[in-house]
Image: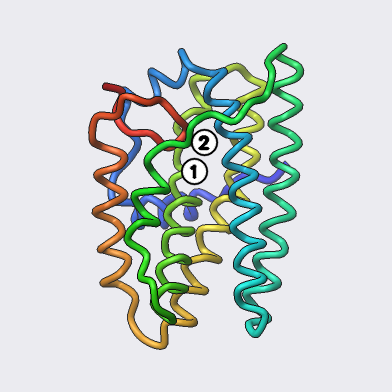
Amino acid sequence: MEWVNPSDLDVLMDFLPCPTPAAWVQEAVKQQEILLLNHCYLEQCAARSALGLMFRCPDKPDLLVKMSRLAREELRHTERVLEFIVQRGLTYRILKPSRYAGWLNAEVRKKEPGALIDTLIVGAYIEARSCERFSALAPHVDDELADFYRSLLKSEARHFKDYLNLAATYAGGPIEERVAFFAEIERHAIESPDEQFRFHSGVPA
């Protein structure tokens, strides 16, 4: 089983604008059915996003390779989460999505190349936050789920770096300003009150 290098988590925490609030973790322990159902959906969304970028950028071989690998990994994760759902006597259903990705994607520029750069930066934030939340959850759930969440850290940390490196490659210049722009949106989504509990939701209201 692959475990994340501690230095990877340090890089990730330097990138994220804030840690997950303790109140979210406490709520997650009580809402494990919703957590699993939403996690399964998000793995499907991650695969769909990667495939969408492949069709959108057929002229970028390095992106095609990284997104192909990412999509395969996310689909394997989908299968594993579905196993947990079935094993625990739950029925998979798609829940109303959280506000998180919607808030980030709403600020993606409409024209290229800005649209691609922003999409990649948003992807980096989603993967980084997912990795950070798996790390935050692992000490508070049963051993089987904890092992699974820890096993996801390596791939999620790599996905974050892949998205960010691709953004830097195709920007043709500094991306720090756009990274900082999305950081504030991400911080607000994570730290502000949120009436709906989901994997990427804010502080439980």
Number of labels in the image equals: 2
Residue shown at 58%/47% (left/top)?
4
Judged from the image, the secondary structure of the residue bearing numbered disc 1 is helix
Q: Between marks 1 and 2, how big is the CA–CA gap?
A: 6 Å
In the picture provided, is 171 more to the left or to the right than 181? right
Query: Which three-letter amino acid code belongs to the residue tagged 1?
Result: Ser
Q: Do the residues labelled 1 and 2 touch (CB within 8 Å)?
A: yes
Q: In front of the other: label 1 or label 2?
A: 1
In the picture provided, is 21 more to the left or to the right than 115? left
Task: Examine the rendered structure and indicate whether residue 182 appears above or below residue 173.
Answer: above
Q: Residue 13: give x, y in percent of width and height.
A: 37, 50
Q: Residue 39: give x, y in percent of width and height.
A: 57, 34
Residue shown at 66%/70% (left/top)?
54
Q: How crowded is mark 1: few (under 14 residues within 10 Å), some or many (20 or more)?
A: many
**Residue behind mark 2:** 134
Q: Residue 103: give x, y in percent of width and height.
A: 34, 49
Q: Residue 104: give x, y in percent of width and height.
A: 36, 54
Which quadrant of the figure has residue 172?
Answer: bottom left
Task: Examine the rendered structure and indicate whether residue 144 appears above or below residue 133.
Answer: above
Task: Examine the rendered structure and indicate whether residue 169 appears above or below residue 194.
Answer: below
On residue 94, the disc is none
Residue shown at 29%/56% (left/top)?
183
Task: Examine the rendered structure and indicate whether residue 191 appears above or below residue 4.
Answer: above
Judged from the image, the secondary structure of the residue bearing numbered disc 2 is helix
The colour scheme used here is: rainbow
Q: Which of 94 and 117 is in front in this view?
A: 94
Query: Which three-letter amino acid code belongs to the residue tagged 2?
Result: Phe
Residue shown at 57%/50% (left/top)?
156
Q: In which quarter of the image is the C terminus?
A: top left
Q: How crowded is mark 2: few (under 14 residues within 10 Å), some or many (20 or more)?
A: many
On residue 130, the disc is 1
Q: In which quarter of the image is the N terminus?
A: top right
